[in-house]
Amino acid sequence: MAVPDYQSLMLPLLKYAGDGEEHKIRNAIEHLAEELRLSEEEKRELLPSGQQAVINNQVGWARTYLKKAGLLASGRKGYFSITQKGQDVLREKPPFIDVNFLKRYKEFNDFYNKDKPTLIAKPEIPEIKGKEDLDPEEFLEIAYKELHNELVSEVLSIIKKCSTSFFESLVVDVLTKIGYGGSRTDAGRAAGRSHDGGIDGIIKEDRLGIDVIYIQAKRWEGTVPRPEIQKFAGALIGKKAKKGVFITTSTFSREAIEYADFTGNIVLIDGETLARLMIEYNVGVSKAKSYDVKKIDTDYFDDGLT
């Protein structure tokens, strides 16, 4: 199952604290992950920013909202416990706790109505369905992901309009930025020099040139079928090559992907993956804006809190 949103975790988190003991947030996250039967992959799933696990983020915001409503209280650093008000809620045995449920409490409304509009009424952020139910950080993450995906589409659209020679040069730039090919000059000389036997170029796997990777870069309309990968595999055998990368502006058929997996020495990079690599390694894109999201440094305030 997918990691539930923070509202779905409010009641399970409150029940977890229902024993009245002081609990560590890390232990709560692990308990809820087990209770939800999340797989190891789901536990490791990261937010689009790559800075935090989704389950950690969602449990963290569930705790924050419950605290703002007065159902949970902070104790020592990284710890929390249930309040009398929280115990009263559990005795009600509600089927679900969400933002609307918490609006019965004045302190929560003071927090929610004060901060929420300023966070969602930004004209530069894409419209997001159900945004009134999102926590602030989740909203920013989703907005970031939408902007990122839109940029991927724009980059891919432009790539498809490039000339063959420019596309080959673009591929070299990406591979060099990733760390292949030695210097850009070396990579430029290697790529595009072959064009025989189904191979478009040769690039160093590392800066020392201990091993090489054979490249095929194709602007392609439609889906790349298995026979194209078979031809490339045959070309690699003819060159006694150990590794190959097939890069296209299009997609690969299921049979093509299965065949590449079967060979064990061919990596397939489709158009969307190429566009995402370009964005990640700043090839053909530039930074427009940057936002620092800051949080309280609890260590700083430890000695001053009473």
Image (cartoon, helix red, strand yellow):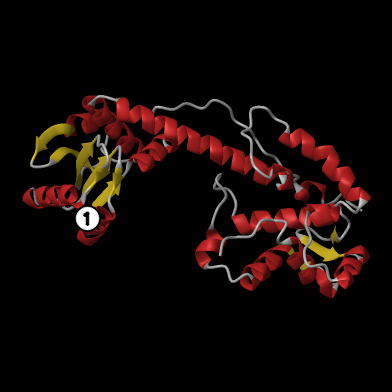
The residue located at (17%, 47%) in the rendering is 228
In this rendering, the answer to whether 50 lies above or below 184 is below
Q: What x and y, as percent, mark residue 253?
A: 27, 51
Q: Position of residue 291 (x, y in %)?
A: 63, 32
Q: Nearer the viewer, residue 174 or 246?
A: 246
Element at label 1:
loop
Q: Most extreme residue toward the bottom, as rendered? A: 19
Q: Position of residue 189 (x, y in %)?
A: 18, 29
Q: Is residue 193 left or right of residue 102?
A: left
Do we see residue 8 in this rendering? yes
Left or right: 56, with 299 as reference point: left
- Rendered view: 207 above or below 267: above
Q: Going 91% across and 49% down the picture, which residue do you hit?
A: 107
Q: Which residue is mark 1?
A: 265
Seen from the viewer's position, the closer of residues 174 and 109 is 109
Q: Residues within 10 Å of mark 1 (few under 14, many from 20)?
A: some
Q: Residue at x 78, y 46 (%)?
A: 300
Q: Reply above or below: 103 against 42.
A: above
What percent of the width, then of the height, locates residue 220?
Answer: 24, 37
Circle 1: residue type: Asn
Q: Is residue 32 left or right of residue 38?
A: right
Q: Report whether residue 206 is seen.
A: no
